[in-house]
Amino acid sequence: MTDFIPAARPLIGDEERAAVDRVLRSGMLAQGPEVMAFEQEFSAHFGLDRACVAVSSGTSGLHLGLLSSGVKVGDEVIVPSFTFAATANSVALTGATPVFADIDPDDFCLAPAAVEAAITDRTVGIMPVHLYGHPANMPALGAIADRHGLQLFEDAAQAHGASLGGTPVGAFGSFAMFSLYPTKNMTSGEGGMVSVANSEIERLLRLYRNQGMEQQYRNEVVGFNSRMTDIHAAIGRVQLTKVAAWTAKRQENAAFLTANLDGVTPPPVAPGAVHVYHQYTIRVPHDRDGMAKALREEYSIGSGMFYPVPNHQLAPFRIDLDLPETAKAAAECLSLPVHPSLTRADLERIVTAVNTLAKAGS
């Protein structure tokens, strides 16, 4: 029987297990020295030259980042609809309104022209998603933000190590959130990391994540329990020592797929962009769902459809909008396995399967 090739595979080794045991033996399990070390090491590893704040999840990182940047009830933040719901959820959780704009068909990220058209007198920020590991067009979006006096935020959940024009993702906006969920390019088991542009946002983030206090029983704001544990931080610290090699392998796997796939559209890479391939996302112009089903049932290959229901069509946000590139991507996109544990035989099997199905029209 042919072994199944999963769409994603978390990589946890003996080093991560040893790190967890070390923390368990220490007796310091909640937010402590491991978290502090992880924050510093994360910033240094990715060349962010910014303070980082560890939190309990990527979603909490977005939520607290927005609150710490002053987003409040009555404000609007422009976001893509073609993304995971956490992007829009985090805006709504502040009491602000997510305003959905269309994407660029080449990089699946917010289209600058669509963003500019969506600005109103209530707009306070723009939050692109560096989707699938490809950086959004931050110079163009930054210019729009500057022209209109808006803040720029980054949902970098899938983009650890991505960059544009030599600037790492996470160093463009008022804050940026990196997810550390198990299927991301690196993990802490669960958690998020927020890079911040200034000390005031950093201070507020640290308050909000810890019940609104820096000193015990000296609460300054209404806060949350969004702390990262030392157990999770210890896993993340080990993963930091491995993620560069994993990223290189993802990029190598992606290059093989791009060079050998036929009948589908591989993911392009913008000039000056470093893509870290959290997902290797192709466009299947005819019967994407049929190809996904056939890959699984006929070739024992997993794949992912991210995101077949755009945010503006979800129940909490349902609104009648014409976002043609979003609609097209939602119908055509299929993410193939690209994770570091793939063998050359796995990659060849994926290519054979996709090319055969594409030629047959799925």
Image (spheres, rainbow, N blue to C red):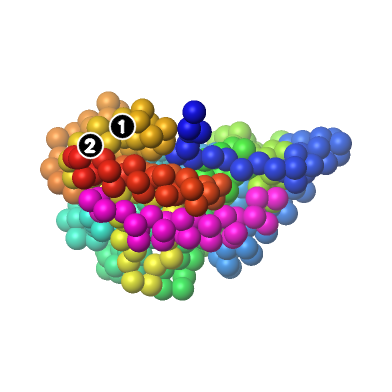
Q: Residue at x 65, y 50 (%)?
A: 239
Q: Residue at x 49, y 55 (%)?
A: 250
The x, y position of residue 232, in whole percent, is 67, 40
Whether residue 258 is in magenta: the answer is: yes
Q: Is residue 359 left or right of residue 206?
A: left
> On the rendered image, what quadrant is the C terminus found in?
top left
Name the foreground residue: 251 vs 138: 251
The x, y position of residue 337, in whole percent, is 43, 44
* Quadrant in the rendering for residue 302: top left
Q: Residue at x 49, y 28 (%)?
A: 1
Magenta span main SS: helix
| Residue span colored magenta | 238-265
Q: Earlier in the sequence, mark 2 or mark 1?
A: 1
Whether residue 310 is in magenta: the answer is: no
Mark seen at residue 294: 1
Asked whether residue 131 is in view, the answer is yes
